[in-house]
Image (tube, rainbow, N blue to C red):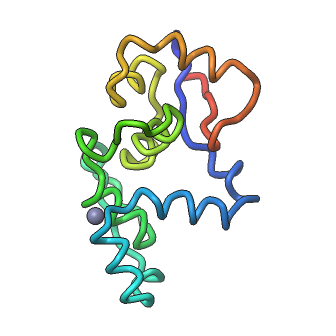
């Protein structure tokens, strides 16, 4: 199976408010507080270098913080977090590098649940903008 999954930002483009709130929740307490205290920071644009490709992209403060500081697959994916939220976070924190169901399952610590994840994705409903793409 070569199907890979990624966050489809076109899907989110019609739900910008929801998107901002959703992503905001992935910040750690410290950075959330910082962005609340220094509201102007939220509009700051940061350069982020992809360690794999060397490509530089410009990202907003929330994304920058999550990718560079807040995300740690060992502790950011909390017990009780839904499968979809965990997968969204993994994709988001990895710069939306497309992943197979197997890779996603491993990343969120649910190696044995690939089948459940596949079933969820094949249900026709788009969950949190995660869509498939053929490699
Ligand atoms: Zn943080």
Quadrant position of residue 105: top left
Relative to 19, is 37 on the left or the right? left
Q: Residue 7: horizontal and vertical position, in percent? A: 56, 43
Q: Does residue 126 sit above or below 116 in this rendering? A: below
Q: Does residue 118 sit above or below 77 in this rendering? A: above
Number of marks: 0
Residue at the spot x=50%, y=59% of the render?
23
Relative to 18, is 54 on the left or the right? left
Q: Quadrant of the C terminus?
A: top right
Q: Does residue 7 sit above or below 19 in this rendering? A: above
Q: Residue 27: horizontal and vertical position, in percent? A: 38, 62
Residue at the spot x=54%, y=19% of the render?
117
In the image, 122 versus 96, the foreground residue is 122
The quadrant where ligand 1 appears is bottom left
Residue at the spot x=67%, y=67% of the render?
17
In the image, 58 versus 125, the foreground residue is 125
Considering every residue shown, the one lying at the far front of the view is 80
In the image, 96 versus 112, the foreground residue is 112
Q: Residue 122: horizontal and vertical position, in percent? A: 68, 18
Q: Residue 34: horizontal and vertical position, in percent? A: 32, 80
């Amino acid at each position: 199976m070569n199907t890979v999954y990624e966050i489809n930002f076109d899907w989110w483009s019609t739900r910008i408010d929801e998107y901002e709130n959703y992503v905001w929740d992935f910040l750690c307490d410290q950075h959330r507080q910082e962005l609340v205290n220094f509201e102007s920071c939220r509009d700051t644009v940061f350069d982020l270098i992809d360690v794999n490709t060397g490509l530089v992209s410009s990202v907003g403060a929330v994304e920058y913080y999550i990718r560079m500081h807040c995300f740690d697959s060992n502790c950011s994916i909390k017990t009780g977090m839904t499968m979809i939220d965990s997968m969204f976070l993994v994709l988001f924190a990895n710069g939306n590098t497309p992943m197979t169901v197997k890779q996603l399952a491993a990343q969120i610590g649910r190696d044995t649940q690939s089948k459940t994840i596949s079933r969820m994705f094949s249900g026709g409903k788009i969950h949190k903008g995660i869509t498939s793409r053929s490699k």
